[in-house]
Image (tube, grey):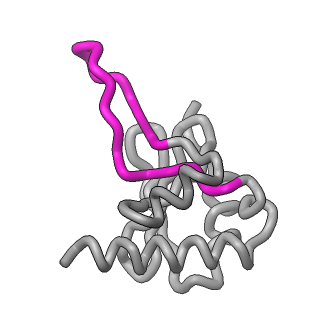
Amino acid sequence: MAVSEADIAFVTDLFNEAGTITTRKMMGGLSIYCEGEIFSIMTSDGHVMLKAQGPLAAELESLGSSKFTYTRKNGTTTSMCYWDLPDAALDDPETAVDWARRSLKDTAEYKG
């Protein structure tokens, strides 16, 4: 299942207050940017995920978030530094924007 225009409108509205939100369709999913910086993805099955490492990733994991994984053609499983957006944030743009800002700050810290 590919990301729909309704999915794009949903994430754009959800994160709107974080700054200028843009998106790009990729491999059936969606990359989500704020002011040109990727901070989130939407998987092809509609899961919204935040980019996170270190303490932010640990916090998301403690809240029950799962890390993005996929299976390669050779059968090995690989993960990326994206974690499920907590369910409560999916219905609350204020909470979603807080998570987005934390993800953007986290991304900047790990860039160096």
Q: Quadrant of residue 46?
A: top right
- 112 sits left or right of 40 in the view: left
Q: Residue at x 39, y 29 (%)?
A: 70
Which range of residues does the magenta coloring cover? 67-86
Q: Is residue 14 above or below residue 1?
A: below
Task: Estimate the x, y position of residue 25 in percent, counting from the top left.
Answer: 44, 51
Task: Estimate the x, y position of residue 40 in percent, counting from the top left.
Answer: 48, 60
Task: Estimate the x, y position of residue 34 in percent, counting from the top left.
Answer: 46, 77
Q: Residue at x 47, y 65 (%)?
A: 56
Nearest the viewer among 71 and 65 is 65
Nearest the viewer among 70 and 2 is 70
Q: Quadrant of residue 35?
A: bottom left
Q: Residue furthest top?
A: 75
Q: Quadrant of residue 2?
A: top right
Q: Quadrant of the C terminus?
A: bottom left
Nearest the viewer among 33 and 111 is 111
Q: Residue at x 67, y 56 (%)?
A: 86
Q: Is residue 10 above or below residue 76?
A: below
Q: Residue furthest left?
A: 112
Q: Residue at x 42, y 61 (%)?
A: 52
Nearest the viewer among 46 and 94 is 94
- 92 sits left or right of 7 in the view: right
Q: Is residue 72 magenta?
A: yes
Q: Is residue 38 above or below residue 112?
A: above
Q: Residue furthest right?
A: 91
Q: Is residue 37 above or below residue 43?
A: below
